[in-house]
Image (cartoon, coloured by chain):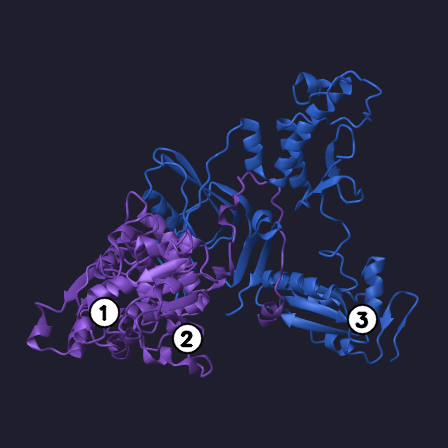
Amino acid sequence: MTQANQVKDRTQTTNRSASPIAAVSGAYAAENSVESFRSDRRHVLDLDDFSPEEIEGVFQNADAMSEVLNRQIKKVPTLRGKTVITMFYEASTRTRVSFEQAGKILSADVINVSGGGTSTEKGESLYNTALTLQAMNADIIVIRHSHSGAPYFLARNLDACIINAGDGTHAHPTQGLLDLYTMRRNLGNIKGRKVVIVGDVLYSRVARSNLWGLTKMGANVVLCAPPTLLPLDFLDEQRRTKGHPFANVEIETNVERALEGADVVMPLRLQMERQKAGHLPTLREYSRMYGINAERLKLASPNVLVMHPGPMNEGVEIDPEVAHGSRSVIEEQVTNGVAIRMAILYGIATPVRERRYVGSRQ
Amino acid sequence: MTKQVQESGKVSWGDAPIREKLQHLPDAPGVYQFRSVVGDILYIGKAKSLRQRVRSYFQPSANHTLRIQIMVSLVHDVTLIITDTEAEALILEEQLIKSHRPRYNVLLKDDKSYPFCKLTVNERYPRLFLVREKHDPKAEYYGPYPSVKDARQVLRVVSRYFPLRTSKMVLDGTKAYRPCLNFQLRRCIAPCRGTVEVSEYQQVVNHVRMFLRGRDKELMDDFEGESVPTGALDIGLYRDDTTGGSRPMMRLTEIPVDIQNRAIVLVDDVLFTGRSIRAAMDALNDFGRPSQIQLAVLVDRGHRELPIRADYVGKNVPTSRDEDVDVRLIEIDGVDEVLISRKENL
């Protein structure tokens, strides 16, 4: 009966004035525009392809996940029957445990693979190891690798969803998200906040992912480091006019000046091998010039947040007094990391869909 | 065009297409649309047998009302839509009448309006009664109700639980009356006695208002001096159908009290397949073991896929699967309404 189908949509108003139902309170009122945002993301490789709306969406889901973390029974059946494999070719405690916990709270089966004691030691290539894991029906592969781009390689060649848990000096998107999330929880909003990242920007994948996230969310980012630890393109003043993606990021080599009025201070871990590579005269000199101590922190905003992606070298880039002081949210970062990773796992694991690499949403 | 109404009421159509068509009517159920010379739809009807029904209009012996007589005199052509069943014809007829609003159809577009409950708040001691039209801008109207029966039911419930007066006399404080039986039955605080404070009666009126607005929570808070703890439950983590590709944003779950051994009423706007309710029950179990779980829904649209049934239903709304039902509430959307629309991407 085609005519019947062509009849215009009918709109009907039903009266329920006298319904015996207790009215729903405003607890479910729509709060922001993220409400309608939906994502088709398959992989999380870096934050460069996240829109501000998507980041806000991850935060909203992370809020819901935080509630699960505070329950007496920390377990929900969401990813039942899903297999998450974490492949860590670099040392890690917090990231690996964080992913493992996130997966297990969501009822996924989490299998950890590390570099040592595996077929990698026998000389198996990354590709073959990954194929093997895929043949075992891994739905999500979380990978950390010392080579930049390794997760992209897997995303191109495997059917599983890939999450980058740190690749070389390139990116660490979940760390970036949890840093942003911690800022949002403590500051309310990120837009317009002064965020100072101090230290080894040149080699830091955390700094790079944070840069993408922070600039997308509208923060005023200041990078503070000795020039030897800053990427060359950032030192080029023509960056501001030449379409550099971070044209508005400030560079400040003097830590006191950088810290003035800062809302967030994030010292990065100084890797010991940098001194050997000739980037620094001595660690002690670096600590004296760039270490975050209580005296320097007074220059920042009174409500400044002290963050650190960990692991910390206390006494080098950060003073123990500051690291464990009242402004420190370093432990909260770890807790938020679990919520963020739950939100990410929830966001990309779906059963019904064609399983082929289509690139991350662009 | 040589068409004229003759004295007997008989019609001659000259060469109007209907003349020819009357000879070849199908003996099948369907909908017929009479059209005028200029092609306007005059009248839409349905029939079990188009042949018999359509021809009946043009029988010399037919005893039509004036309205139909005039309509018949204007008929120039007829369009037929044949359906498989009479029921199908009935649905199609209703939809067509609603969309075309033909001049000579009465049913489904008549002037009889739906009833309201009128609360005369401009009076010193307001009254509540049934009306058909909203004339008085100073009074409050509740409704419209789907039928007079529903409206009367509302009035009955109000008079049973709220001691509002049912008498009609003017009470402006100058004259006192002897209270009627309702006072003895404690169904009325009898402002007619002249001794009732306006503020006392006003409180009753306010309760009636809350009741009529369907804001029973406020009413309960005010009546019992204690509110029922309410929480919110997001079931995203418990769904069994992670819909193909896109995932809705989650909202915060807030359970403000320990639910162990308590009676829980789940409230949802639309009850459909029942899968959300299944998920909600699973979610509740992660917080404790309630002594009882009940379900209240504003709209039950049918199509259940699980053995789930609501304990309280605001309204049963039969729908087709390719329709969307959207409930809006004043607290969230600024308006109380239920919207039924066809799904966009089908």
Q: Position of residue A116 (x, y in %)?
A: 10, 68
Q: How many marks?
A: 3
| Chain drawn blue in the picture | B
- Disc 2: CA contacts within 10 A as few (<14), some (14-19) or many (>=20): some
Q: Are marks 1 and 3 in contact (CB under 8 Å)?
A: no
Side of A82 where B184 appears, left or right: right
- Whether residue B138 is visible here, answered yes or no, is yes
Could you tell me how far apart the alpha carbons at marks 2 and 3 are, in whole angstroms? Answer: 76 Å
Tell me the CA gap for discs 2 and 1: 27 Å
Q: Mark 1 Cα within 10 Å, few/some/many (few <14, many 20+)? A: many
**Secondary structure under the numbered disc 1 in the rendered image:** strand
Residue beneath the point at 44% across and 65% down = A219
User: Mark 3 highlights which residue?
Assistant: B75
Q: Which mark is residue A246?
A: 2
- Tell me the residue that label 1 is attached to: A143
Q: Chain of mark 1?
A: A
Q: Colour of chain A?
A: purple
Using the numbered discs, state the Cα–Cα distance from disc 1 to disc 3 in whole angstroms. 78 Å
Viewer-proximal residue among B294 and B126: B126
To the question of a shared chain for discs 1 and 3, the answer is no
Name the element at disc 3.
loop
Point 19% across, 59% down: residue: A93
Q: Quadrant of residue A120?
A: bottom left
Secondary structure at badge 2 equals loop
Residue B319 seen in this snapshot: no
- The spot of residue B21 in percent (x, y) is 73, 76
Q: Amino acid at mark 1?
A: Ile
The correct choice, above or below, for A191 with respect to A134 in the image is: above
